[in-house]
Image: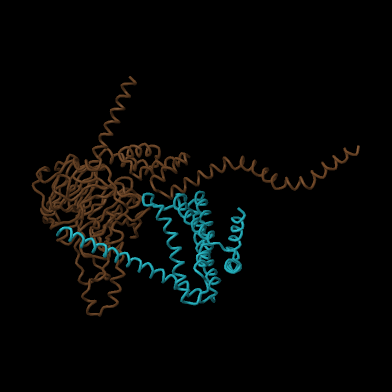
Chain colours: A brown, B cyan
Amino acid sequence: MTTLRRNKAARIATASLLASALFMPGMATAKDPYPGYTYSSLDRPLAAPNAYTPERMLDGAALGTGSLRNPNDLFVRDNRIYLLDSGNNRILMLSEQYRLLTEIKTFRNGDKDDGFNNPQGLFVTEDNHIYVADTDNKRVVHLDGAGRFLQEIHSPKSEILPANFQFAPAKVGVDRAQRVYTVGRGVVEGLIEFDSDGQFSTFMGAPKVRFDPIDLVWKRLSTKAQRDKMVQFVPTEFNNVDMDDSGFLFVTTQTKSSAPIQRLNPTGLNVLRAVDSAPIGDLNHLFGDESMFADIASGLNGSYSALDMTKGRIFTYDEDGRLLYIFGMSGQQVGNFGTPVAIDYMGDKVLVLDRERANITVFKPTLFGAAVNRAVDYQYKGRMDEAKAEWEKTLKLNANYELAYVGIGKSQLRNGDYSAAMRNFKLGSDRDYYSKAFQMERKRLARLYFAPVMSVAVPLLLLLWLGPKAWRRWLKPRLRKEAFHVDRS
Amino acid sequence: MSTVRKQFKFTMFLVFRPFKGFWDMKYESYGSLRTALSIMLLLALVTVCKQQFSGYIVNFNVVDELNTINQLIYVIVPFFLWCIANWSTTTLMDGEGKFGEIVMATGYAMFPVAVLYLAQTLLSNIITQQEAAFYYFLDTLAILWLVWLMYVGMMTVHQYSPGKTAVTMALTLVVCGIILFIGLLFFSLIQQIVGFAQTIYKELVFRT
């Protein structure tokens, strides 16, 4: 029985080894249409096993909905997929098995039939209410779960808005207090916030203006006529919005920005955690191939995935802004993208909507990706020992995975195994935690050895210091005296 | 053995009492060129040790980019560059120092840096990130001490006024830059001449 079990264990080990061999760089192309890589702590690209692999591609024919035209947004709520088929002005509701459940094309608005006109954005609340950014109708439409019309939000009216303000909502997000946040096309003041009655309340999270110091020097030197012809320093424009599980807003910017991904708290402050550096996608952003994010999806446990339009890549970060893995690529094969525009999670699967190809690509986690996801999950919940076991699995598949070493180290630190933790933090290049582990280890060693070392060293030093003096002053004369005394008798 | 001890005592005296120390070095022939060069080599060695053995918390070296030969060169080349540049400058500016004296003064001035770097390396292995400030403080201290000793050394060796010493030292840095520039120019010219000669040779070989 035991041999059998051992055999089985060995077979599993070989299988996982084989699997890891399959994911090795060079061979990865045979399976996935994109190379797996990640960035080391020195910001160097490193080959890595792929975390996600394309499972299937769904177009209009596969979905049985007729062909899609320029679909622009995708939302998953309670394992139901809401697909915004902008070109056909309809919303498609799909089941977990990718079967069509409902199609919303028209709705009763008052006493007449109403419809969408090139809608760009879609949001579904926890009670399954649907908000649609009905872009060319210049309004946001609020429907209930069955597709019945409830409310529409029109162009905001306020004295802080310019007279020629054009309301073209492109994306929409709704928080738990029914406040509606919209990304307006050409609006640089931030998100347009409406209260639950659809009344404009404020702009929030206005992005800062960023400029090049060199540009500033040129502007200073040039004449007014020259200046007027130059590109103005315009604040970055948000291009997408999503809510995370704890009710914070995730926004992305497409224009050049030092913080292309932001997590806004209710007052509009960016509270995105970035332990090492701000998440910006690809790090070698020379030659203009800087990552530009089209959408962001918050996964479980504070992690989030951002969709990069430049190269068609998906960057997944943990709650601390550490890069977990990268997958996806622009291209022609199954699993590649033309113009990816929207991303969302369905369980641990990732759905990416491609506008150009009018299809959805479903990605499922690989052995490696699933282990990372589970490890992040356990770590988030504070179950460090279970996280450690998962991190060890990821290390078997990718010995270069620094996060895993740090994760194992954290568990060891908690369990008091300081020297092992130090070793792992060093392997994971985490100086902060290394310092913490080192401090504990130093304390432990000091407690262990201070008393014995000092109880030997202090008398020894005293003896060395005072001994010769004492010898010369008291012992030697007395001995001599005694000798003398003896001699006399 | 006794000369080593004498030189050690003298060096210790010099780094704490630089005015008297450098005077003795120049006029009372206490200084030794061999000691100065040994101190320089010691510093080169200690620098390598610092790179290699500093504690992980303050050690930001990328191990696969570390090159011990380069580390040695980063101490030895600037040392001689400084000496040559300083000699060239002070010769034109009525400095009284001979080249040997300049080398000696610079060498002795490096001693505290070597000692402090060694202390730093040891310290860095028992500190945490919160205490790293001490480590960086020692860095600053070493540099300040070096500059101070160099300043006093140059002043004494060349018998300059304090102001003129400062000016000469600044000029020496400029001259260092010029020497490097000319060096680079020279190498690139030599390269081109060699390339030219090679081309002519090839041309001749292929034609005959």
Name the one closer to the observer, A439 or A91: A439
Query: Going 26% across and 58% down the picture, which residue do you hit?
Result: A285
Q: Quadrant of residue A110?
A: bottom left
Residue at the extreme right of the image, as rendered: A489
- For the N terminus of chain A, the image quarter is top left
Query: Going 29% across and 68% down the picture, which residue do you hit?
Result: A212
Q: Is residue A107 in view?
A: no
Name the one closer to the observer, A125 or A197: A125
- For the C terminus of chain A, the image quarter is top right
Q: Classify residue A447 as left or right of residue B193.
A: right
All told, the count of numbered labels is 0
Name the one closer to the observer, A234 or A402: A402
Q: x, y percentage for residue B24?
A: 60, 67
Residue at the extreme front of the image, as rendered: B208
Q: x, y percentage for residue A289?
A: 23, 58
Q: Quadrant of residue A395?
A: top left
